Image (cartoon, coloured by chain):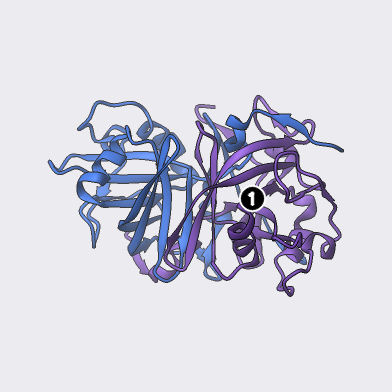
Chain colours: A blue, B purple
Amino acid sequence: MSFKEMDIENAYRILAPRPTIIVTTINKNGEINAAPFSFTMPVSMDPPLISFASVPSHHTYKNIMETEEFVVNIPGANILEQLWITGEKFPPGVNEIEKANLTQTDSLKVTPPKIKECVAAIECKVHWIKKAGDHDIIVGEVLHVGIKDNILKEGLLDVEKVKPVLHLGGVNFVIGDHLKKVGE
Amino acid sequence: MSFKEMDIENAYRILAPRPTIIVTTINKNGEINAAPFSFTMPVSMDPPLISFASVPSHHTYKNIMETEEFVVNIPGANILEQLWITGEKFPPGVNEIEKANLTQTDSLKVTPPKIKECVAAIECKVHWIKKAGDHDIIVGEVLHVGIKDNILKEGLLDVEKVKPVLHLGGVNFVIGDHLKKVGE
């Protein structure tokens, strides 16, 4: 079967489904923000670095420019509806964690809080930020990783238990719970 | 439930499962390479940019440094075993597409070929490359997107049909075929 052409602007729709994260940040006035992102990937093991892409107009981006810290919270399928609420447009200074009826809890190495209902929280400080088209790529150095009990299986995410939230586009998510090992 | 500490070097294991791509490249001598990656994310809509992370010692990276072009091929679950073969260590100059019994077909805007058995192919030229720890982030500008018939549903990847390959770690993949819409 041959290929047919698709609009290049929609390339992101086929690089999917993508792990969805909730990024928590704080500005210099101590106001907390939370928002979901799915343009995200690990980058390096040594030093441990992870990244995500944000538009510069986003409160998350502005807070990171001010305080250079953020927490990448990993949600399970059980909080998909709340995750969606953190992505709604609120005025600056509104705490989306509260709006979504989620619970914030202190981080250990950075000032932005983590979200208690998430299965894991990766505390980061900025490694570098670089413009790439209409987004900026934010690379964070991992300072601490907190995980809930029993979310790992043989050292990897237990996807059948956690049911990670994968973003397809718009309101569409995939709850990936099927596991296949190569060669079996 | 409270969080417990996890080694920071393993942060990448919980930012998962991740879309898996096969990147095809060519060096200045015309030798073709193919290899799987799962540290990948879209970056920008206008201009359309996508990215992935590679160690600098990788043939893919070296070829891109020479010719500044690459193709991001999107596999479906039906070629998971062949995908795995393209990730094996072969000497420089070996064409992993042939080794995996896959078929190469000409791209339209770049020199590296695309893989006929994949559901989509995103042809890119380098936008920028920047070191980030033990990997480099490679950002590519999308020049052409080719897709197979019927892989989209309402403009998004039809995951129930395509069954995209998601990487969990090592030999472990998730074949995500469950779709959930927010609010339903």
The residue at the point 31 percent across, 36 percent down is A101
Name the one closer to the observer, B46 or B154. Answer: B46
Give residue A115's position: percent from left, percent from top. 32, 48
Q: Is residue B162 above or below residue B175?
A: above
Helix, strand or loop status at disc 1: strand
Question: Which residue position holds label 1?
Answer: B69
Q: Is residue B119 above or below residue A150?
A: above
The residue at the point 42 percent across, 38 percent down is A135
Other-residue count near label 1 (Cα within 10 Å), few / some / many at <14 / 14–19 / ≥20: many
The quadrant of the picture occupied by the N terminus of chain B is bottom left
Q: Quadrant of residue B28?
A: bottom right
Q: Is residue B52 left or right of residue A148?
A: right
Identify the chain of the residue marked 1, using the numbered disc in the image.
Answer: B
Q: Is residue B93 left or right of residue B131?
A: right
Residue pushed farthest front? B28
Residue pushed farthest left? A29
- Work out whether residue B13 can be spotted: yes
Q: Is residue B101 left or right of residue A33?
A: right
Name the one closer to the observer, B85 or B35. Answer: B35
What is the total number of numbered labels drawn onto the structure image? 1
The residue at the point 76 percent across, 43 percent down is B107
Name the one closer to the observer, A151 or B175. Answer: B175
Give residue A23's position: percent from left, percent from top. 35, 45
Q: Is residue B181 above or below residue B137?
A: above
Give residue B175's position: percent from left, percent from top. 68, 50
* Amino acid at the residue labelled 1: Glu
Q: Quadrant of residue A17?
A: top right
- Work out whether residue B14 can be spotted: no
The quadrant of the picture occupied by the C terminus of chain B is top right
Q: Is residue B155 above or below residue A158?
A: above
